[in-house]
Amino acid sequence: MKYRAILLFGAPGAGKGTQGKILGQIPNFIHFSCGDAFRNLRVDTQLGRVFMAYASNGRLVPDEPTIELWTRSVEGMIATGRFNPEADTLLLDGIPRNPRQAEIMRELLDVKAILNLFCPVMDKLVIRLQRRAFKENRLDDANIETIRNRLETYRRETRAVLECYPEALIHQIDSTQEPLLVLKDILKVVTDLPKPAISDGGTTFSGAHLIRP
């Protein structure tokens, strides 16, 4: 089966992680941050070494280890009961990061919406990333050159992901607003999405309605 998903999209520093963590507290929404998953790897593992080699100078981790990490993580969440594919929606933050990843994951995801957190002034993102680096001790945001490399990588490689999906799925969210107002705009989109149908024997439940086959 395909995993029901909402993509949190935007440049580094746009607020994907902040909004994803908030939405992930809502029942049946599971936030997955690809960046956090890589940062939580031990540096003495193969994937951990790959992440450090690329992230330390602002480059994206290659597609194969990225998809491998995501697949392992989702399978682990299913095995431990943290994610129920029949009832839950994945909030994907930081994946897919380029058109090739979007193509690879096409058979794995049922994308219901893309929340594009846009920021027309890149200098604001630089300031946010610098502030976050000191607050969270994030080595991948530690210096201005790395930050500018990450933003250029996003412009050159990641932004094209939007072209891989129908325009009707893409919702523009102004990330320069206060976080509470960003959340308000996101919730307007999310609450209008159709609820997943949950099968229970011969009866299918969809939201508060019963649909009998």
Image: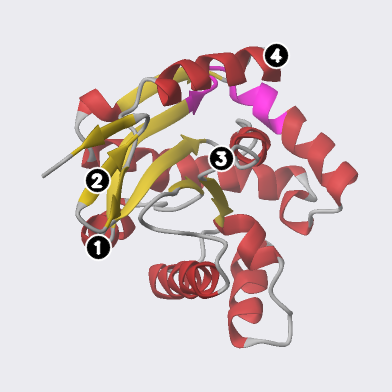
Mark in the foreground, 4 or 1: 1
Q: Is disc 1 in contact with disc 3, using a CB cutoff of under 8 Å?
A: no
Which is more N-terminal, label 2 or label 4?
A: 4
Residue at mark 4 to residue at mark 2: CA–CA distance = 40 Å
Q: Using the rendered image of the protein, determine whether residue 189 is visible from the camera's viewpoint.
A: yes
Name above or below for residue 136 compared with residue 72.
above
**Which label sits on residue 151?**
3
Q: Residue at x 52, y 15 (%)?
A: 185
Residue at mark 3 to residue at mark 2: CA–CA distance = 45 Å
Q: Which residue is mark 1?
A: 1
**Which label sits on residue 178?**
4
Residue at mark 1 to residue at mark 2: CA–CA distance = 17 Å
Mark in the foreground, 4 or 2: 2
Is residue 120 found left or right of 98 in the rendered image? Answer: right
Q: Is disc 3 in contact with disc 2, using a CB cutoff of under 8 Å?
A: no
Say which element carries label 3: helix
Could you say where residue 160 lies in the image, as x and y percent from the top left?
Answer: 31, 40
**Location of residue 82 (image quadrant):** bottom right
Mark in the foreground, 3 or 2: 2
Say which element carries label 1: loop
Residue at mark 4 to residue at mark 1: CA–CA distance = 37 Å
Q: Is disc 1 in contact with disc 2, using a CB cutoff of under 8 Å?
A: no
**Which label sits on residue 204?**
2
Which is more N-terminal, label 1 or label 4?
A: 1
Q: Using the rendered image of the protein, determine whether residue 58 is visible from the camera's viewpoint.
A: no
Could you say where residue 149 lies in the image, as x and y percent from the top left?
Answer: 59, 47
